[in-house]
Amino acid sequence: MNITLRKANAIQISINDALKAISFETQVKINEFQDAEAEIARAALEFKTDLARRDALTEALYEIRKSVGSANAHVGIDTRLADVANLEKQIQFYNGLAGKTVRESEKVVAGRLDKIRNGKDESRRSIYGYADTVDTSIFTREDLDGFRKLVAKSKKSKQKFQDEILELNVQTTVELSATAEATLATEGLL
C-alpha cells in the first residue's frame, strides 16, 4: 500500500498516541475470593498481548519513519526544511535589528558632546547623576529600511519553500509493508 508523506506523518502521530495509551501492568491485586493463578495468568496474558501490540506498532512506526526519511532526501524536502529553518533564524535576527532606533544626527551628537565638554558645573553632574556621554544608535534610517526589506524578502522565500514542501508532501508516496499495513489496519489507524 502506498501513502503520501502527509498521510505518513498523520499515521506516525496516531501510532505515537496509540503507544502512549498502552499500559503495562506488571502487578495484579487478588482478593481472597478470586482464583489466584487464574488472575495472574489473565494479567500475564494481557501484558503479553499489550507487549505484542507495542512491538508491532513500534516496528510500523520506524518502518514509516525510515521510508519518509529516504523519500524526504530523494525529493529534496530535507534541504528545503533546512532552508526554512535558516530563513526563520534570519527573520528573527533582522526583525530585532529593524526595531532599533535611528541614530542621532551628526549635529545633535556634536552639540551634546560640546555641551558636556564645556559644562562648568562638575559637582552638579556627580550629585544629580548627569551623564558625561551621549548615547545613540549606530543605524541610519536606510540601515533600518534595509533590514525591513531583508525580512520581507526572507518571509517571501520562506513561504515559497513551505509551499514546495507541502506540494511534495502531497505528491510523494512511500510504500507500507504488508506487515505494517496489517498492524495499522488492526489498530484502526488506516
Image (cartoon, rainbow, N blue to C red):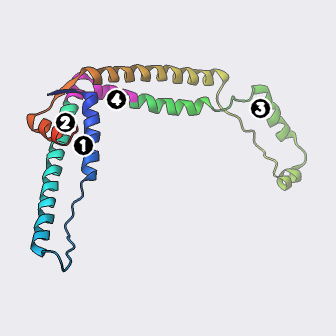
Q: In the image, which is nearer the foreground, mark 3 or mark 1?
A: 1
Q: Secondary structure at mark 2?
A: helix
- Label 4, label 1: how far apart the Cα atoms are: 23 Å
Find out whether residue 83 is within the magenta segment: yes
Measured as percent of width and height from the top left, residue 101 is found at 68, 31
Q: Which image quadrant: the N terminus?
A: top left
Cα–Cα gap, marks 4 and 2: 19 Å
Q: Residue at x 34, y 20 (%)?
A: 164
Q: Where is mark 2, residue-wise?
A: 64
Percent position of residue 53, x then y: 16, 50
Residue with the mark numbered 3: 109
Between label 1 and label 2, give the one nearer the viewer: 1
Say if mark 1 contacts mark 2, CB within 8 Å.
Answer: yes
Report the residue at 29% width, 46% height from top.
17
Q: Which residue is mark 1?
A: 15
In front of the other: 169 or 90 = 169
CB of mark 4 within 8 Å of CB of mark 2? Answer: no
Q: In the rendered structure, are the residues bearing label 3 and label 1 in contact, judged by CB atoms less than 8 Å apart?
A: no
Q: Nearer the viewer, mark 4 or mark 2?
A: 2
Q: Earlier in the sequence, mark 4 or mark 1?
A: 1
Q: Nearer the viewer, residue 26 or 88?
A: 26
Which residue range is magenta in the image?
A: 71-84
Please name the amino acid that badge 4 sits on.
Answer: Leu
Tag 3: amino acid: Val
Circle 4 sits in a helix, a strand or a loop, which is it? Answer: helix
Circle 4 is placed at which residue position? 81
Lower sequence index among marks 1 and 2: 1
